[in-house]
Image (tube, rainbow, N blue to C red):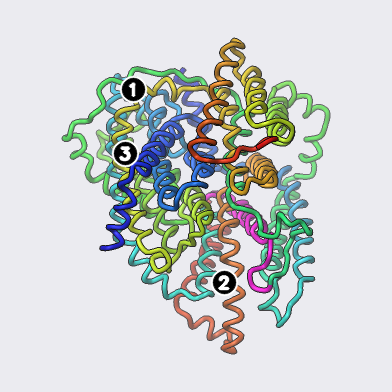
Amino acid sequence: MDSVLAALKDLFTLNMLIIALSGTVLGMVWGAMPALSTTMAMALLVGLTIKMSTYEAIMFLMAIMTSSVFGGSITAVLINIPGTPASIPTAIEGYPLTQKGEGGLALGTAIVASFLGNWIGIIAVIIFIPLIMAIALKFGAWELFLLAFWGIVICGTLVGNEKPIKGWISGWIGLLIAMVGVDPINGVHRFTFDLPVLIDGMADIPIIIGLFGLAEILKALASPPLVMEARPVGRIIPPFSMLRKHTGVTFRSGFIGLIIGALPAAGPNIASFLAYIVAKQKAKKEEKENFGKGSYSGLIASEVANNACIGGDLLPTVTLGIPGSAGMAILLGALNLHAIRVGPALEMHHPGLIHFFYISLIVANLLMYAVALVIIKPGVKLFTMKKEILMPIILPLCAIGAFGINQSVFELYVMVGTGLLGWALYEMRYPLAPMILGVILGPMADENLRKAIIIFQGQEATLLTVLSRPIGTVMLVVIALTFYKGLFGKK
Amino acid sequence: MMERTMSIIEELKEKTEQEVEETPAADFFMGIVLMILSGIVAYVALSWPRPSGIASSAGLFPFLIASSLFIMALSIFIHSFKRKGYRRFVELFGRAYLREAWTRGNLRLSLFSLLTVLVYLVVILNLLPFEIGTFLFMTTALYLYWKTKIYKILIVSACVVAFYSLSFKMLFKLILPGVGM
């Protein structure tokens, strides 16, 4: 109870509320603009958290994440161009409604669906975080190594989609990048080339900004321009009867979003598509005919799922230190900057921080709802800004964010290098999310593998002793199944 | 309009789902690069000190990663080889392909974008203060990409630079890149 009160005390300061509000507005505007994704918003704006306190940084990033996931649906509904990939199903159903003159109502429904989706995520987070942490406290070095390794493997399998090997290669490259610097056990210099700047290893944030900021800018500048035309918005608030009619879709999609979110790096994009497909399959005959022509059911499914996913993403991130999405990997990077190592022992090392995560999600959700209602109508002009104008404006943000970490030009070059690498890999159809997971989880995997071997050697353990550890053995089976699914699963 | 927007959605869908797309030339190239890289890493990792056996070796994990990466690289290399990746790779440097890519504009646009970004990040920020360098970059980039009246470009560039400089320095207390930071 004391930690809840302490978290609340930190929340109700003017500074914190300004930070929460600015995070919400920035996130929503960012998410609404086509070609700017949630991950990119997190990657570029994380630079602003350097001088913030830990609580302020968490509040700022949670506000950005929550509102940018919703923001993508604004342009999806109004101009048929999804602000983020997670809003594609929203565009498929929302834009036909706009053409019928129901654009405002479709947007209002999307706002309420996102709000409810976030609540489903918040409730799950409050219930499951303590449970998962209690289990995770039983993990030893061996289990922690397997967990980090599985995080990268499953991420590669999921985002590599039909070519998981490309996802794994991307993750493995990230692991190699993470090996640069002084080895944590013996102090051996690994891949430092006698350069003092490499002794501490490569900082996460410039790599993240390079992969999700600079590479995205290069992609957008090198692609043909989008045609955008704004339409009038009209009435926004949806009638209660309509929401009641879609209770089943709401809960089902929320559940899908949670489960997908809890899988490493399987973020809102997969969740919204899956929930949309399931909603279509489960719809009654007359509703099914509306799909593709403006179905509120499809719209709600997509929005509830991609927002519930945020809570799901937070579960493995906070309890195990395994990012639930690329955005959460950035949150971990920001927490590393503040010397916070998330994981099972988080509550012991930083009492009250978990409660602050809950509270920040609730505040971000409430602010998202309020800000969405206020800025949608006046913001339509801004949301349709061309990417040819946006990208040159955003590029200096990459430089500021990367440089700001250590005030070092070297970090700027790291960002440029990883940006070019990210762009080249994207052009060759390699997903980038596993690489970030590799960079973040690499040190954890390396340290725990070696600790585990030292412990096993000390105990003179045989293969049978290692396999008699139930959690570790279950995880080994899960890893083997993940590889099997990736290699031989249904394409 | 509807057709155009639907095609954009289709394109986005395609990118999001990372649908199967055979890229034999890229796989051929990446296969070779990754095999060389992982081979070097594995060799270097083996040479690191091992004070008390394998468990204490700093090279254990990098060696495991590099050797498994080598196997994966070999796998995509063989896959691309079966699909004549080497031939497609050589074709990429052929005069006919380059001329077509240049005429269609995608190669030109990609190289131009790359050059703009690199000049700003690597050259301008090493020669000029943030505000002046960013103003020059933004004015040039907006002139080239936006193609609107110059006074509009100058106003937008000046406003954005002023906003960045004031908000980051005053509000977020950050040091900005560039000479004389």
Which residue is rendered at x = 63% and y = 24% of the image?
A: B135
Chain letter for mark 3, please.
A
Give the residue at mark 3.
A367
Magenta-colored span: A159-186
Element assignment for label 1: helix
Cβ atoms at labels 1 and 2 below 8 Å apart: no
- What numbered label is drawn on residue A377? 1
Element assignment for label 3: helix
Q: Is A165 included in the stretch rendered in magenta?
A: yes
Q: Earlier in the sequence, mark 3 or mark 1?
A: 3
Dot 3 amino acid type: Leu
Other-residue count near label 1 (Cα within 10 Å), few / some / many at <14 / 14–19 / ≥20: some
Instruction: Find the distance from the CA under tag 3 to the CA under tag 1.
Output: 17 Å
Q: Do tags 3 and 1 sit on the same chain?
A: yes
Specify whether residue A242 is in view.
yes
From the viewer's side, name the closer residue of A281 and A111.
A111
Dot 2 amino acid type: Asn
Q: Is residue A55 above or below residue B52?
A: above
From the viewer's side, name the closer residue of B19 and A183.
A183
Is A478 on the left-hand or right-hand side of A211?
A: left
Give the residue at mark 2.
A448
Specify whether residue B22 is in view.
no
Farthest left residue in view: A241
